[in-house]
Image (tube, grey):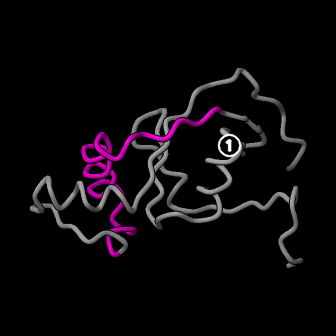
Amino acid sequence: MPEHAPGLHRRHVTGEDVQIRAADRVAPYGVTNWVRNARAAGQVTLRRAGRRETLRVTEVPAADRVPILRQYWREVPVTRKFFGTTSTSSDELWAAEAQRHPVFHLADTDSAVPDGRS
């Protein structure tokens, strides 16, 4: 795989692809490159089933992430090892964990277009 270069698009399928609410994306692995890129650009491009869609992103404040992260933890067990919490953890422990796991609200920009890939 070539070295990362600005403007180079990569396609990754990860736990972030799981939607908790229709408009939220969780970063279960913490602040990774896709999180840094989303913060810098203010948008993400998702590809699925031959369609490409660019969406605006707004980071959910850490104080508002606890219920989203709890639900994500319940519904996506493969990522649980990246959380320092359990189903019985206190809200305070979940709030501390929320600092490590960004959550983004996605807003439609009406930009769904054919991807051109098979």
Q: Mark 1: which secondary structure? A: strand
| Position in image of residue 113 (x %, y %) | 81, 30
Task: Please report the residue visible at 68 percent of the width from the left and 53 percent of the height from the top.
Answer: 37
Task: Please report the residue visible at 49 percent of the width from the left and 45 percent of the height from the top.
Answer: 25
**In which quadrant of the rendered image does the N terminus lie?**
bottom right
| Position in image of residue 117 (x %, y %) | 87, 48
Type of amino acid under label 1: Val
Task: Please report the residue visible at 26 percent of the width from the left and 56 percent of the height from the top.
Answer: 74
Please tell me whether residue 28 is drawn above or below residue 114 in the rendered image.
below
> Relative to 83, is 109 on the left or the right?
right
Please tell me whether residue 2 is drawn above or below residue 14 in the rendered image.
below
Task: Please report the residue visible at 66 percent of the width from the left and 39 percent of the height from the top.
Answer: 42
| Position in image of residue 85 (x %, y %) | 21, 67
Indicate yes or no whether the magenta region holds residue 14: no
The segment highlighted magenta reads: 56-81
> Relative to 18, is 113 on the left or the right?
right
Please tell me whether residue 98 is drawn above or below residue 5 in the rendered image.
above
Q: Main secondary structure of the magenta part?
A: helix
> Relative to 72, is 53 on the left or the right?
right
Which of 26/61 is in front? 61
| Position in image of residue 50 (x %, y %) | 78, 42
Indicate yes or no whether the magenta region holds residue 70: yes
> Which residue is labeled 1 in the image?
44
Q: Badge 1, how many Cα within 10 Å: few under 14, some, many 20+? A: some
> Relative to 94, is 36 on the left or the right?
right
